[in-house]
Image: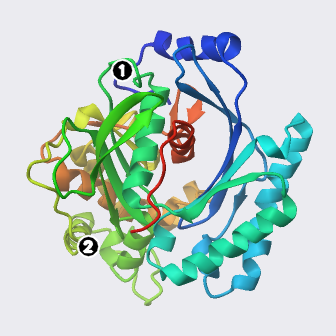
Amino acid sequence: MKNPRFFSYIKFIIPLIFFSGISVAGSYYAVVDAGSSGSRLYLYKKSTDAQGNPIAESLPLTGNKVKPGISVYVNQLAKVGDYIEPLLNTLDTELKSKGIPQSEVNFSLMATAGMRVESPNLQDAVYDEVKAKVKAMLPGVNIQSVLTIQGRYEGAFQWLTVNYLNGNLATGAETTCMLETGGGSYQMTWQTSSKLKNSIDVFSLNYGSTPYTLFSESFTGLGGNYSREDATDDPNSFAVGYPLVSGATGTGNYKKGLVGTRKFIRARDISIPTSVKVPALNKCIGVSLFSSVAKDLKLGDSVSSKRIDEAAKVVAATPWSVQVSEQPNNPRLFSRVDSAQLASELIRTWFPGNRELPVADVINGTELSWTLGATLFLSSGNSLPTSW
């Protein structure tokens, strides 16, 4: 899916020209996205363009996913090594097949919302086990960061990914606001002109030598997994006839389900500083949940609360048995109504009015993953905070 807003292919081709010709050989970054539902390994080759800005090429991997989320093992430390081993085997195989010395690889495991709710002591114990396993299996790699990242940095990394692939960085171009909902949290990130006093959600970072000041706020708990848990006993968040664990069945009353989702969102601290200017919705791009809802409801390359609601009402009113017969292999079938309610209400909460949000999960052939932004962040000399 191409970015529906704007993008000149020239902007994208120029970095590729530098990469294939002028750029110098760089190091490799192996980054594990340890998310709420599972962990996934990404490998990037880093080089620089003629201006010294970092370029990150994603190298394809197979066998780079494991489930469940690493937070499951906070009380099962003896199993952490076995959990991470398949990803390290994949990395080892890839390095050997391409003749890449371990000494050229920077390894990071960055956990997100699933670990943010755990005790810091338990987190540290898990990460000690991860580092021990990495040292045992890949003794030559540089262990760079094994930690839980703050939600605002998760948002910043995805912002970097989106704007890097759009060709916006270090060019003076207008940057794109980023909205993301994963399994455990919701992030919204955009460039701002000034750093607000006493606001941890406004901070600066560099891409190469170009500084950017971002507003990036994360709301732990406003993710798809938490929303589904909250809706488990609400028949209005499921299609007609869906069998709930409680013994009740789905009503398909989408409008009532929206009210429940609204309460779910408002139960958290959703305020942002009044001095922060919220961009227009069409200046943003929605990823993860927003993109998957657009696909499930066949809404095209953009969504709005109104169009989500119209399409999801039809899904909610379609008997569950009919949906299963039509899409027996759709793993997201049961959660389509709840996901639509969450996406619709998130847009409505911060971006009132019937405006369209462009969505994407791929930009110019590259999958959107915040691990790409993390690679650009680290290779630009930025450092992550070591405390909360």
Q: Can residue 279 be seen in this view?
A: yes
Q: What element carries label 1?
A: loop
On screen, residue 311 above or below 245? above
Residue 197 x, y percent position in the rendering = 16, 53
Q: Give the CA separation, mark 2 to mark 1.
A: 34 Å
**Of the image marks 2 and 1, the number of the one nearer the N terminus:** 1
Tell me what residue is drawn at x 85 percent, y 66 percent: 136
CB under 8 Å between callouts 2 and 1? no
Q: How crowded is mark 1: few (under 14 residues within 10 Å), some or many (20 or more)?
A: few
Q: Depth check: 381 or 297 in front? A: 381
Q: Depth check: 245 or 377 in front? A: 377
Residue 209 x, y percent position in the rendering = 44, 27
Image side of residue 375 versus residue 222, left or right: right
Q: Can residue 240 be seen in this view?
A: no
Q: Name the residue under label 2.
A: 264
Tell me what residue is drawn at x 39 percent, y 86 percent: 248
On screen, residue 29 above or below 171? below
Residue 384 x, y percent position in the rendering = 47, 54
Q: Mark 1 points at which residue?
A: 6
Tell me what residue is drawn at x 32 percent, y 55 percent: 343
- Quick one: quadrant of the C terminus? bottom left
Tell me what residue is drawn at x 27 percent, y 54 percent: 201
Q: What element carries label 2?
A: helix
Looking at this view, name the residue that lies furthest to the left.
274
Image side of residue 317 versus residue 225, left or right: left
Q: What residue type is labelled 1?
A: Phe
Q: What residue type is labelled 2?
A: Phe
Quadrant hosting residue 314: bottom left
Q: How crowded is mark 2: few (under 14 residues within 10 Å), some or many (20 or more)?
A: some
